[in-house]
Amino acid sequence: MPAPLEGAGMSSTQPGSSPQGTQGELVEFRLHGIGKHAEWSALGRPSLLDPPPPATTHRFGVEDPAVRVALPPTLSTRPVYLMNWSRTSSHWGNTVSKLWYVATPYTLVNVARNMRSRPDPDPVTGRPGASRALRALEMVGTHTTGMLLTGLTLVWLAALVETLGRLRPMAPVVRNGWWGPVVVLTVLVLLLGTVYARKHESRIATSAPTLLMHVLTLVATAGLLLLQPSHLLMRAEAPPSVLQPLWSPAPTDVVRAWCTTSEASTDTCLVATTTGEPFLWFFDPLATASLAALAVVSVIALAHYVAGMRSRSPNVTGAGLALAVAMVTFLGFASALRVALEFLVHYLNIFLAGGQAEPFTRLVMPPYWGSVTQETGTQFTSNTLPLYGVAGLLVLVATFAVLSQVAKRRMPASDAHPNRLVVAARARHHLVRNLPTTLAPALLISALVTVGAWALLYSAVTADSPRLHELIIFLLHLTYAAAFLVFLLHRYIGPLDEILGKLADVVGFWPAEHHVFAGISYRTRVVQELDRWMQSLTVNGSVLVAHSQGSVIAAWALAQNRIPQRKVHLVTCGSPLDTLYATFFPAAFTTELRGRLVAAVDGRWRNHWRRSDAIASPCAGCVDNVELPDAPATGRPSGHNNYWNDPEHVQGIDRWLEGVAPAARAQG
């Protein structure tokens, strides 16, 4: 609910009523950007004053850190309403919020599909539409990645349940032949039930064909697991392409295998068979399916990269990046969760003094054969997937940090400034504005370095070095502990909660249309509430002031004619409409949508931006783009924040409305 500004002749109101003392008065309606916001954050932050010289020496030094004096934010001369839409995707509670973050990989697939190219020519710019081959690549690549994630969801959930079977008290149960099939079928029913529930959720816009694709994927995955159980072995004398499926025998019939004839010790054999024949290699669905899916998505991302380069379409390159990040994120999180659970089971078994159970009736997990420090082969490789994901993320961040330094060196002379912080902020601004040309080379460099880092990590994982393995397991413990803390306690870690909240606000703009497990979007709900409150509280000539992601919401609402009964003035500040949305979502943020936006406000649109703001820029279609000065001689530049209490911003709106508001009100 919007919060009215106190001290300006206003009181709390409900829809359909008017504030006391403001009947028919022009009002200002503010919409904040991404991140976690308090009810009053759209007023701006107070400016802290430097302390005066102390009369006496204070035991804390020159000032008491618990006592500060500040100037209030610059206030508008009009009544102001503040609409808080932060965390609309997780207002049901902490548990649902965490599930929303777990759905991030599926949500990224949904975002990638919304990054598709425009199919028809642009009537304004004359740019031709995407070719049929490019549109086919975008559609097939996105849906393939989505279905792979859906299938892997069943595989990894089954692995989680089977990991619990390693508890000593579970041994009598998991030794029965029905344990593996029951696990897979139970997980299948749970996932199908989730699909059914989301189909009847009004905020889910997934189409019937997409739902059917994912249902068939789940059923097919379960069928493959039941028909081709985990113990897929390759005979040493058979060609490498021939795999022999093998059901796990009863424990009484076990003869150890995966050993040479001269190495039949119990410590070196992994897989049980009744034949005792030597085998060359061991396969299990958990590692095989995960690595195969990663390979397929890597090819899809590479195809997007090449297509984006050839068509000069940064949205295609960005979609490939989103799909790759979705798969790596899923595998890293799933592996971290499973191995963290396995560590817990291992320590519980030590506590119970019962040792480890050794069941041989699994469909997903390979047989357990010793302590966590003895794992080798594909299982240990799959357990280290979180380290691969962290390495890839660090390389990507480092690549853009280097590009920011390059952008700083290539800035025009007009952006030179004695304050290094201002120069750094302007370099980030140029980096983002030049993403259409710099994204592809940056991703190529990042991909090459990532592959090199992964090769080094793989060589370390597979090296015959117990000390190195102990170090890797120690790093895994740290990784899983950090993931556990992030997942459970992120709301209590301010900076981390802010980062995760901003990520959710960015990717949550798009309705869950293209993946059945994507996070629920906030866009429809916020647009409906914005429409309802503005219809109730504003009059002709009122002004809607929207910052950052709020400007995207406002533009979408106005362009969709959601506020038709009011002649509203629009002021955007720190807006990513051109730098991000028009660039990476050309099929949604078209020139026609921009035209409808301009028509909805009768051209009464003013845009404020700064050169120290990384994502803001002049907006096409806006005839009143105003650059706000932001170059302090010392200290931090305002950058993307602090528009609300910038006197140039507030007073600029006042001066602008003096000329345009009377005419708009007269038309009403």
Image: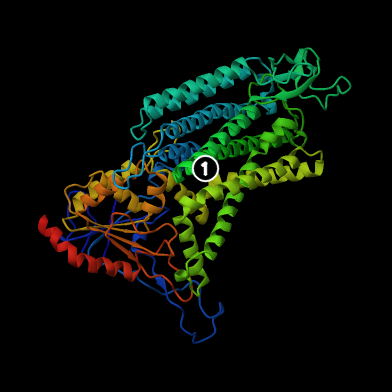
User: Of 656 and 585, which appears nearest the observer?
Assistant: 585
Position of 164 relative to 415 (above/below)? above
- Position of the C terminus, as image quadrant, is bottom left
Image coordinates of residue 537 in percent, x first then y, are 20, 54
Position of 47 relative to 403 (above/below)? below
Image coordinates of residue 428 in percent, x first then y, are 49, 60
Q: What residue is disc 1 on?
A: 321
Answer few, some or many: residues within 10 Å of disc 1's Cα (few below 14, many 20 plus, some between 14 and 19): many
**Residue kind at label 1, given as amino acid type:** Leu
Q: Residue at x 71, y 22 (%)?
A: 359
User: Of 226 and 214, which appears nearest the observer?
Assistant: 214
Q: Residue at x 77, y 41 (%)?
A: 469
Q: How is the image coloured?
A: rainbow
Q: Residue at x 17, y 58 (%)?
A: 541
Left/right placement of residue 12 relative to residue 417 reads left
Position of 481 relative to 667 (above/below)? above
Left/right placement of residue 578 relative to residue 296 reads left
Q: Quadrant of residue 223?
A: top right
User: Element type at marker 1?
Assistant: helix
User: Of 14 and 322, which appears nearest the observer?
Assistant: 322
Tell me if residue 537 can be seen.
yes
Determine the residue located farthest toward the bottom in the rendered image.
55
Image coordinates of residue 560 in percent, x first then y, are 26, 43
